Amino acid sequence: MKILLLGKTGQVGSELHRTLLPLGELITLSRAEADLEVPASLIDVLAAHSPDVIVNAAAYTAVDKAESNTQTAHAINAESVAVIAQYARSRGALLVHYSTDYVFDGAKTAAYEPSDITNPLSVYGRTKRQGEEAIVASGCPFLILRTSWVFSAHGSNFVKTILRLAKERDELRIVADQHGAPTSAELIADVTALAIAGFRQGLCKSGIYHLTAAGRTTWHGFARHIVSRATANGAAIKANSEKIHPIPTDDYPLPAPRPKNSCLDTSALSEALLLQFPDWTVHVNRTVDQLTTSMEYPL
């Protein structure tokens, strides 16, 4: 089996190297080698490698910048995805694609199921939903994996930002009325490999699935947990967990609106793969431990 990974340097892409290698021949491409901002250029790239499985971990994820860079976000998140899906359809290749909680408006009180009506609030959310729609319309074999609040020890993310700010500042003010499940790139990559294997075994059918850690918290609760763990590890923290104050979304305005509820129901994927997803704190602890005991974040 030949697997083509797009977006190899991102948070999820970096972890996918490890989990996809045992499944077959793995080809990994960066943006320089497969530029999703130029959708038409992808046709030759895909044809040159003739993959059996395409894993698209590339995306325009700058949520706030997307509000003013609409054309770029649409090209990467929607137009290029349509090109990839059409190629997958023509070759019978499986397309694995990552989407987001931002396709929902957050008005639902319970966790969102994959079949729930979407209503994205932002350009980012709309372009990601358009990418989903293009895949479904293409008729290719596909696994769309929606996730939320992604973090890892690599790249830019909430965990690393909070560790940096808590080291620099005496107090932090963090939004406390948005709910979700922090999900590690490590978990996403692990489950992706299992989903591909499950698809080939007939356990996991084409469709949209939700892939997040178990449990729920707020950005404020997330930040407090990060700092508490770092403090327990002996990290030099100024703003301890008691100095992280809750604020409403309205007190921290951003260009792109966020859903108040980003919780996703993962039962369909869990049942298909016979998996139990770990609580969000498990991988957060692992990541904080890694960052607070390395040269990248010296004690």
Image (spheres, grey):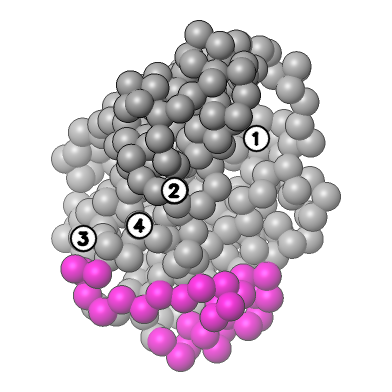
Give the class, few, some or many, for how many residues have Cα within 10 Å of label 3's Cα (few <14, many ≥20): some
**Which of the 4 image quadrants contains residue 120?**
top right
Q: Given this view, does label 1 or label 3 mark the residue nearer the observer?
A: 3
- Asked if marks 3 and 2 touch (Cβ < 8 Å), the reply is no
Query: Against 297, is 279 above or below?
Result: above
| Residue to which mark 4 is pinned | 15
Measure how far apart labels 2 and 1 are at the Cα level.
39 Å
> Does 40 appear above or below 64?
below
Spatial CA distance of label 4 from label 3 is 17 Å
Left or right: 256, with 179 as reference point = right
Which residue carries the number 3 mark?
197
Q: Quadrant of residue 105?
A: top right
Q: Residue at x 61, y 75 (%)?
A: 35
Mark toward the start of the polypeptide (4 vs 1): 4
Whether the magenta-drawn stretch holds residue 30 is answered as: yes
Please tell me whether mark 3 sits on a helix, a strand or a loop. Answer: helix
Q: Nearer the viewer, mark 4 or mark 3?
A: 4
Image quarter of the N terminus = bottom left
Q: Which residue is mark 1?
A: 119
- Which residue range is magenta in the image? 21-49
- Residue type at the position of mark 4: Glu
Q: Amino acid at mark 3?
A: Ala
Q: State the residue in front, 21 or 243.
A: 243
Q: Secondary structure at mark 2?
A: loop
